[in-house]
Image (cartoon, rainbow, N blue to C red):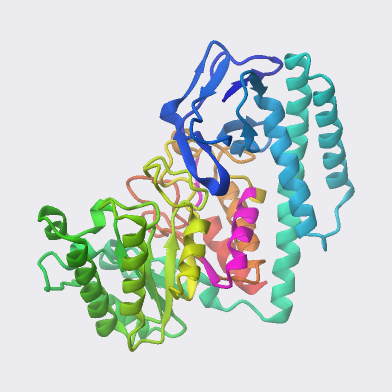
Amino acid sequence: MKFQVFKNGSPAQELNLEGSYIFSHDNYLLRDSSLIQYEREVLAADCTGSETAALCLPWDIEGIGTIMLPTTRLLRQPGCYNLNIELARARLMLIISKIEDYSEIEMSESMIKYFDNAKKSFVDAIKSSANPQEASVHADRSLINALHFSEKLAIVQAENGFRKRQKLSNYGKDYFGCKLEVEHVKKSPQYLKKVINAFGRVEIPLNWREIEKTPGQYDFGSLEKIIKVLSSSKGIKITAGPLVSFEKECIPDWLQQKDASFADIQEAAYGYISECLGRFRNFVDQWIVLKGINCKNCLKFSLDEILEITRSAFIAARNGDSSGKLIQICDPWGSSESVSYDNIPPLVFLEMLIQQNIWFDGISLDLDIWNRCKYPAVRDLLQISSKIDSFTNLGRQIYVSELKAPRQSDSIYYGYWEKEWSQDIQAKWLEYVYKIALSKPSVAGVSYSAAVANSNRPSCGILSKNYDVSKAYKKILKLQKL
């Protein structure tokens, strides 16, 4: 598959392809950025094995930000597509689809103007397709207007849905959660005080590798005391997990070092899950049982083994315990460069579980846009809204997790959204995303990734290293009182 690429009406001299990928139907990953090249003013990617495919790449949009934008799925052909036209086409198709879904909203005059200009410019681009450079200018104009409309559409839908749910029943404080950082609990009582003040649900991270360093011997360290302290705090609910993740850093060394069979691994996981639930069943009301097994599978389980160990894990978690059991979905766009090409797209995987009668109560939807990415780009608000929508038809509650946003400019990691990142922009972006998520009737909570700035990505905290509160922290408190 080949594309001509233009910037300001001229062939692009260079193109940022970090984080770009090619995908087919149902978001099956075909190629990552290492196999996509831009040479001699042509972007090329080998799509062997698929009749149709789509490209997603970071794209700068003035006044919006550096956004990950996809094309539609396109047929392989000998000649080149015009990338500018295809990006505009894909966005207009998404808009038309979401206008139908959000039919109850009333569009303002400015929204109508953006949409009309986007459609008119796209028609002009198609009419000028014989002159690719001229067509790209019209397509760029169409895309800019379409993205401005997209942001407004997502915001209006979020505001309407948020208010509607408020009228039916106020959001409880437990709709607002935060992942606990154990090192800060040990460091200062101020940290836990600030977390409990702003959030009604606390997510306790568990790492099998750290807890069961020796087979059958479990060391929960300070976690046991922290869980019991939190459970006695008025109005605080506890989520714990993930219990099991088959990422290398989460699997006990003794399971990786010896020649463990699948049966050995399955038995060990069952025993560990049973131990955790037996110990904390009176304190934890929700468990993340399994994380990202459809794409984080360093032990290279087959599809049948993935389904079998998932079934076994949820059976162990259900035995004698009535708390909620979640499965965590990582990278819902299916774009992580760390996955292998035999990964199972998230929605396909969840539908498999339902068809196999593997019961789970809800979905923990990991919306950390930056964690697994090496490029400075974000997803725009309509993409986020649309992605959450895609999981709402499964008949399960959704808990948005791992949410975060930068509080200061750091273009190496985060790019920009509207303007360079600042406390004001962080608070604004988070307000919109919280409202987008909580406007969906299936969404039962949103959990912030980490309250305090950490050493890896220091600008994403809503508390400073001295535990001073940010504007985003205050915004989260305000959302609970609206």
Q: Position of residue 311 (x, y in %)?
A: 36, 71
> In the drawing, does residue 196 fall left or right of residue 306?
right
Res. 242 visible in picture = no
Relative to 20, say whether 115 is above or below: below
In the picture as drawn, the residue positioned furthest to the right comes out as 109
> In the drawing, does residue 262 fall left or right of residue 197?
left
Look at 50% across and 33% down and name the residue there: 20
Q: Position of residue 105 (x, y in %)?
A: 82, 60
Looking at the rendering, which quadrant does residue 164 occupy?
Answer: bottom right
Look at 52% across and 61% down and name the residue there: 473
Question: Which image quarter holds the N terminus?
Answer: top right
Looking at the rendering, which quadrant does residue 60 occupy?
Answer: top right
Looking at the rendering, which quadrant does residue 32 occupy?
Answer: top left
Residue segment shown in magenta: 383-408
Question: Which image quarter holds the C terminus?
Answer: bottom right
> In the drawing, does residue 119 fall left or right of residue 468?
right
Relative to 300, say whether 341 is above or below: above
Per the image, is 94 magenta?
Answer: no
Look at 46% across and 74% down and name the residue there: 357
Per the image, is 402 magenta?
Answer: yes
